Image (spheres, helix red, strand yellow):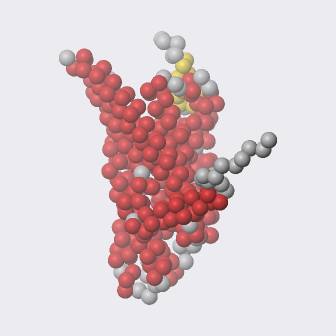
Amino acid sequence: MATGFSPLLGLAGKQFIIYAGSATFIAGLIGGLVDVVVFLSLKTFRLSPCGFYLLIMSIANVGQMITGLLSRILSTGFDIDWSLTSLFYCKVRLYCYQVCSLLSMSCICLASIDQYVSTCSRPQWQRWSNIKVAHRLCVICTLICIVHNIPYIIYYNHVVSRSTGKVSCTLTNTIFDQYAAYSTGVILGKVLPIFTTFSFGFLSYRNVQQIAYRTIPMVRRELDKQLTMMVLVQIAFGIFTIIPYTIVYLLLRIVSLNQDPVIATRLQLAASITTVFLYVYFASPCYIFFCASNRFRRQLVYVLFQVWLKKCRQKGILSNQVTPESS
């Protein structure tokens, strides 16, 4: 009976990735692009270190949606897996996904640290909250992510199964496979960012509670409160979406559990569900910012309807006038 139930679990996992994954991809792509437009359109965010970190994070999240979730939806739901037919795509897709994933988590860490130092009462710490420092740190983090993940390009290859003759895109280096699984996949990509953002987020919240008692310009005070709240809610949401995926990911690495077909099928279903929830985290920033900050809602409406709608009308894109044809 348990064996007959296994195909139903596999089908449920497949359907969940198709429908929930597709909705997450569309929402994440739209939300990520909206975030990029808002952060680039407003001088308030362009000159804010935290706003710049969130901008880079949004760009990296869009990259993750395309290289990670879209490929999973196509391969799971429609049997379209370009990594099996193209060695270049096999190597580059995983590489780009890992770069975007690590860069996104690095940026949310930098944003939480920046909010701590910017709201700190010590002037020597506040000086580190600087847009020039933010630019340099983002360049350094991007270069580190690019160089650190180069082994994905080297060790991901096409492997032909001797029993079935099917081609698979897998890591061919056992040592790097272990490193990628536990170091990149768990520590650097999940545990360390969660610990860092939670710690500095908590310290930032304490600092914000004391801002009212300091002599700080009103504009700077409101901006600090807004960005701190946006980052804090994003951090809290990340804890509930990233930790379940990490737990299931580690269970899948235990060989003894996967030898039992029933347990393996249940773990695969859990992996499908938690993987989509992991992508929900990367798809959610725009909607979290919208719900957490009343000021961000006003800024979003202003950018979309006052700035961009006005530009479209000026260029005649949304003009209702009909231009007569020349004879």
Could you say which quadrant of the image residue 295 lies in? bottom left
Q: Position of residue 290 (x, y in %)?
A: 41, 60
Q: Name the residue furthest right.
A: 327
The residue depicted at 35 percent of the width and 67 percent of the height is 202
Q: Position of residue 18 (x, y in %)?
A: 41, 31
Q: Is residue 189 visible?
A: no
Taking depth in this image into account, of 76 and 197 the one nearest to the observer is: 76
Q: Position of residue 23 (x, y in %)?
A: 41, 40
Q: Going by the image, does 278 lie left or right of 263?
A: right
The residue depicted at 41 percent of the width and 55 percent of the height is 287
Could you say which quadrant of the image residue 128 lies in? bottom right
Quarter of the image that includes the N terminus: top left
Q: Is residue 62 visible?
A: yes
Q: Position of residue 164 (x, y in %)?
A: 48, 12
The residue depicted at 44 percent of the width and 88 percent of the height is 215
Taking depth in this image into account, of 280 and 169 the one nearest to the observer is: 280
Q: Name the residue furthest left.
A: 1
The residue depicted at 58 percent of the width and 70 percent of the height is 43
Quarter of the image that includes the C terminus: top right
How many numbered circles does the render carry? 0
130 up-or-down from 239: above or below? below
305 up-or-down from 209: above or below? above
